[in-house]
């Protein structure tokens, strides 16, 4: 079984998700990676904002591209949950990227997903991870 995104909340998100979403949006709009990840999780869960996998994916991708391991892991989860098997190689790459940073569950998810990929897809993913550089803020 794949490790899923954390339901762990902190800093008032659990008690007032709408207010948290407003403040996180302000920070996310300023390119704060941690805020992008937390807001992504709110959109993914539909807490304080309407559930939107598209918005969650876009926010997670922004933070993941900057190198935030939690966002890389979460983006892998979102891509898998789309059930679009064409997105699985990308999910695999993000899990590998998070696993390099020892993000909990990322290596496990990458190993499970690897079983569903073609050898060429795995090879391309490993090459992409090896050459990957985070975007500058």
Image (cartoon, rainbow, N blue to C red):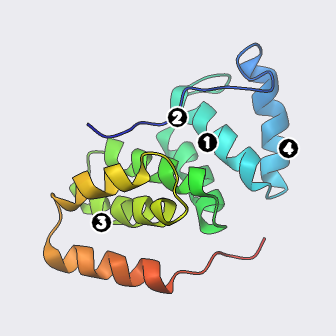
**Which residue is at the far top?**
15
Mark closest to the chain's N terminus, 2 or 3 = 2
> Horizontal and vertical percent for residue 78?
43, 46
Mark 2 in CB contact with mark 1 (< 8 angstroms): yes
Q: In the image, what residue occupies the spot 68% across and 39% down?
A: 39
Mark 1 lies on a secondary structure that is helix
Mark closest to the chain's N terminus, 4 or 1 = 4
Q: Which numbered dot is residue 26?
A: 4
Mark 2 in CB contact with mark 3 (< 8 angstroms): no
Depicted 65 relative to depicted 42: above or below:
below
- Neighbours of disc 4 within 10 Å: few (<14), some (14-19), many (20+): few
The Cα atoms of the two marked residues, 2 and 1, are separated by 6 Å
Q: Which numbered dot is residue 44?
A: 2
Q: What residue does disc 3 label?
A: 89
The Cα atoms of the two marked residues, 1 and 3, are separated by 21 Å
The Cα atoms of the two marked residues, 4 and 1, are separated by 13 Å
The Cα atoms of the two marked residues, 2 and 3, are separated by 21 Å
Q: Nearer the viewer, mark 2 or mark 3?
A: 3
- Neighbours of disc 3 within 10 Å: few (<14), some (14-19), many (20+): many
- Neighbours of disc 1 within 10 Å: few (<14), some (14-19), many (20+): many
Mark closest to the chain's N terminus, 1 or 3 = 1
Mark closest to the chain's N terminus, 4 or 2 = 4
User: Going by the image, does 78 lie left or right of 80?
Assistant: right
User: Going by the image, does 36 lie left or right of 53?
Assistant: right
Q: Which numbered dot is residue 68?
A: none
């Amino acid at each position: 079984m794949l490790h899923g995104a954390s339901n762990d909340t902190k800093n008032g998100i659990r008690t007032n998700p709408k207010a948290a979403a407003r403040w996180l949006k302000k920070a996310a709009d300023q390119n704060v990676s941690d805020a992008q990840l937390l807001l992504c999780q709110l959109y993914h869960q539909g807490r304080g904002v309407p559930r939107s996998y598209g918005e969650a994916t876009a926010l997670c991708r922004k933070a993941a591209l900057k190198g935030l391991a939690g966002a890389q892991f979460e983006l892998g989860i979102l891509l898998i949950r789309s059930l679009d098997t064409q997105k699985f190689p990308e999910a695999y790459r993000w899990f590998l990227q998070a696993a390099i940073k020892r993000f909990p569950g990322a290596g496990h998810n990458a190993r499970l997903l690897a079983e569903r990929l073609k050898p060429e897809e795995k090879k391309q993913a490993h090459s992409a991870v090896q050459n990957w550089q985070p975007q500058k803020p």
